[in-house]
Image (tube, grey):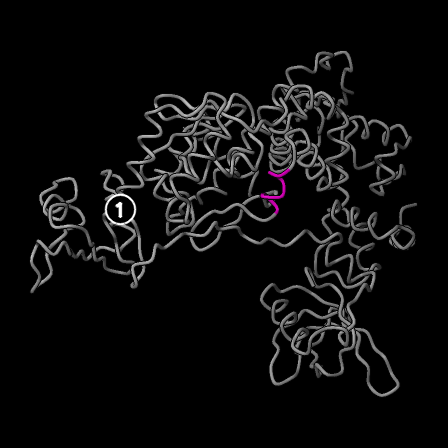
Amino acid sequence: MRTAAIIEAWLQELSDSDLDAVLRDWQVPQDTATLAAAAKWMNEPAALDRMLSRTTATDLAALRSGDGTPALAARGLHPDDALRARIPASLELHAPDASEQREDTSPAVDAAAMSVMRLSGAVSSMADQPVRLSGRGIPLAAELRFRSSELGIEIAEWERLLAAALHYRFIAPLDRELCASDTGVAWLDLAPQQRWEALRELFLAELSLSECAFLDQGTPSVEQTLPLADAATLEQFCALLERATLLGLALDGRITAVSPEQIAQHIPAPIDYVYLQLDQTLVAPGPLSHSAARDIAEMAVSEARGMASTWRLTPASLHSAMARGRTAEELLERLHRLSQTGVPQPVEYLLRDAERRFGAVQVTEGETATVRTDGDTAKRLLVDRALTAIELRVPTGRAIEEGVLHSASSSDVVLDKLVEERYPALLVDAEGAPVVSERRIATVSGRAPLSNLTERLRGLGVEVSSMQPDWLQAQLIAAVKGKMPVRVTVASGTQVQHATLVPLSVSNGRLRGRDLERDLERTLPLRAIVEVAGLQNA
């Protein structure tokens, strides 16, 4: 007979990682105070029904016949009369037909290779140039068009790649931009097949026990696999199957077995060369090594990314490299090193001309812009109708021959417009030195191996004395904002007490919180807290 006491004893015997997996799979509330409370919650009819709705037809059939399976045992579902009674007798349970599984995995290998290269392209694109976000925190329409075109895919497909990159923390928002993260840059440093392996490991590591059992079934129909699932559960598992498809772990709704060796054979080894053409494009016939891609990205703009890639040398891209201190000779030497076809004469002319015109039009950084150039160029700027939007004018008391113009628009807006119209514009500071935009990489924290609920229920705390003086207060303030329960150990004289609190406020050296076990409000001096558990990213 299933009882809360039996469940609690089983939970006590589990390892920390297994306990964490069970609590996550059962979706035990974060404010649960003790393992006994967790066991009681897991024995409630609503919790049991929720678990059965996430149970596969094969495992439901085993439960109804009084048998167990390894998946059921791992999830804490053991056959008994009470559990069997919750499965409708009229429910038809169909085990998946193994004969329906694809024997040919080559389509899945194709999908996996294409997906990892497209995701690599999306992340590397944001490493070279962050995606600009609107005030609502979504990519601008122009960004959607350019980034999807760069990868040769539809906007909807690019948005799915974006969601995956965010989910796995390869990119992160930073000051109204989406930037590659340190995790994403490290991922790009791997060989393509290693990127897929890392991606697969990330995917598998975050699966719940129910999701693992579902994927093991290998069925084309989510509804057939989860016959007791409600609409929300079906939507969740359909999304899971879509993510598996994106990684090449599933194809046509069926789970496939793709090995890293197959991926390695399918994706060409990274190359460190390009073909430099007369039209000033650089064509990489295979995936570029990360270092070669960085060298090219510094002096060229991307036009296409994927298994192969195309880049273009432009006056603006060369000026950007020169602003970083590169000379025409250095860039020419780099092109000779990278190009298998030498450096065509038109490209050399482009480099020399870019060097000659570098800094001919200077835009001083600021909320409003001052443009400095020669008198003849200033006259051209004033009459160029394409520049009407930035409203250039000669400052009062100045002559046009001095080559100084002013705009009420910001320096970024003026610079972008001048570059768009192919003027050799350069952003400078008040002293006239080039302003170089640093490569923006977001720093993301690693995922905690255990949830804060598991750490708290196991009492896996951090000794306050081993941390900085202000550490405890900062962590508790964060817990107040997140309404996250913590377990504190309080020393008073020779006595040591434990309490599970939902922090409400931290002020004047005291913590005020709601005691989950006693259901009352308590105030504790911070100096008396010697250990705290349940803090994520402590």
Q: Quadrant of the N terminus?
A: top right
Would you place residue 118 above or below residue 1 in this image?
above
Q: Which residue is drawn at 40% across and 46% down?
A: 132
Which residue is at the front of the view, 119 or 363?
363
Residue 81 in the image: x percent, y percent? 89, 38
**For residue 158: magenta?**
no
Q: How crowded is mark 1: few (under 14 residues within 10 Å), some or many (20 or more)?
A: many
Q: How many labels does the image show?
A: 1
- Report if residue 53 is visible in the image: no
The residue under label 1 is 425
Q: Main secondary structure of the magenta part?
A: helix
Would you place residue 157 above or below residue 220 in this image?
below
Q: Is mark 1 on a helix, strand or loop?
A: strand
**Figure quadrant of residue 105:** top right
Would you place residue 41 above or below residue 124 in this image?
below
Would you place residue 187 above or below residue 456 in this image?
above
Answer left or right for 179 relative to 246.
Answer: left
Answer left or right for 358 relative to 496.
Answer: left
User: Which region shows up in magenta?
Assistant: 183-189
Q: Residue at x 84, y 39 (%)?
A: 83
**Figure quadrant of residue 512:** bottom right
Residue 381 in the image: x percent, y percent? 14, 45
